[in-house]
Image: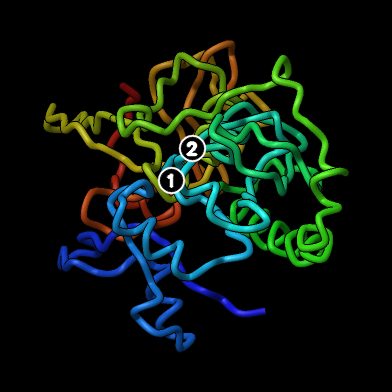
Amino acid sequence: MTVAGIVTQPPARRDRGRKVLPSPVAQYALEKGLPSDLIFSPEKAGDEAFLSTLRDLQPELCVTAAYGNILPTKFLNIPLHGTVNIHPSLLPLYRGAAPVQRALQDGVEETGVSLAFTVRKLDAGAVIASKSFQVDDQIKAPELLSLLFSEGSKLLIRELPSIFDGSAKSKAVPQDDSKATLAPKIAPGEAWLSFDQEASILHNKVRAFAGWPGTRAKVLVLDDKSGQQNELELKIITTRICQSTEVLNGEQDYVTFKKGSLVFPCGGGTALEVLEVQLPGKKAIDATPFWNGLRGQKLKKL
């Protein structure tokens, strides 16, 4: 089997230096020795110049994974055996741009990966194969994404013979659109935590938005001796649900410290333990050194 070409996102400004760099996929392909003239990064998958080049390559099969662009009919008509997509959810659940993040945000106990034919309707093609997994309540989105795409690649390799001999199309199972759920793209403004929500909702959000955009909270640092107060923005990195609310002692406004975690009172009489935080421009640190750095000052949630 020969890789006819790689299609990926255009170069973009990345890292702290904001240099224009090829996408991670393009960089990986170059490192593996794929000629640069076989790496394509069209602004749109429907660009005529790109489609003309793709036709010249005469691909038998196209495979997509987190590509991020809608593929037009002109594209889908080119490969002899069609286009298949590795989608990190159990379709028809969580169709869309952020299936893993939205599944974790919802607190699902089971998810998986699907290999499906690509059609013009978003993630709606017949499913060739799928594999499900139990979801650990501490796993974060980047880890789960890595696992699901790894297992999805194995599904693809296993199913390639049936795709090439045509039997995959006859065995593929059409999706039940009535059971479909959507996983819309995450907006940066969703990153803020609101502690009037229950701890389980916040914990799931921290796991879901790990990596990007992350989750943030505003707190007030109070110095009783001087009367000064400073507002801090904290990036919340790692959390768990507090199993005992005795630590709250009836106080719903102030953050306390217990055995290596910052305890935030939350809605419904629940509490969230924050194990790791990050200040703007600083490295992530455990809750203990952060708390020690307060030097007796109080921490109030906002």
Q: Earlier in the sequence, mark 2 or mark 1?
A: 1
Circle 1 is placed at which residue position? 68
Residue 301 lies, with reference to residue 144, above or below; the image says above
In depth, the one of 162 and 148 nearer the eye is 162
Mark 1 belongs to which amino acid?
Gly
In percent of width and height, residue 119 lies at: 59, 37
Q: Quadrant of residue 18?
A: bottom left
| Picture quarter with the C terminus | top left
In the displayed image of the protein, which residue is found farthest to the top? 268
Rendered location of residue 45, percent (x, y): 38, 49
Q: How many marks?
A: 2
The structure residue drawn at horizontal position 23% and vertical position 30%, both measured from the top left corner, is: 222
Q: Is residue 296 left or right of residue 87?
A: left
Pointer 2 residue: 97
Q: Is residue 250 above or below residue 140?
A: above
Q: Is residue 273 at least partly visible in the picture?
A: no
| Residue 1: quarter of image | bottom right
Q: Relative to the observer, which residue lies in front, 125 or 90? A: 125
Label 2: how many residues lie within 10 Å, few (<14), some (14-19) or many (20+)?
many
- Crowd class of label 1 (few under 14; some 14 to 19; many from 20; radius 10 Å): few
Relative depth, front residue between 85 and 241: 85
Residue occupying image coordinates x 59% and y 31%: 95
Which residue occupies 49% across, 40% down?
Answer: 73
* Residue at the image position 64 percent from the left and 31 percent from the top: 124
Label 2 SS: loop
Q: Does residue 95 appear left or right of residue 54 in this picture?
A: right
Give yes or no for contact between labels 2 and 1 (Cβ–Cβ under 8 Å). Answer: yes
Q: In this view, does 115 lie above or below 31?
A: above
Q: Is mark 1 on a helix, strand or loop?
A: loop
- Closer to the eye: label 2 or 1: 1
The dot on residue 59 is none
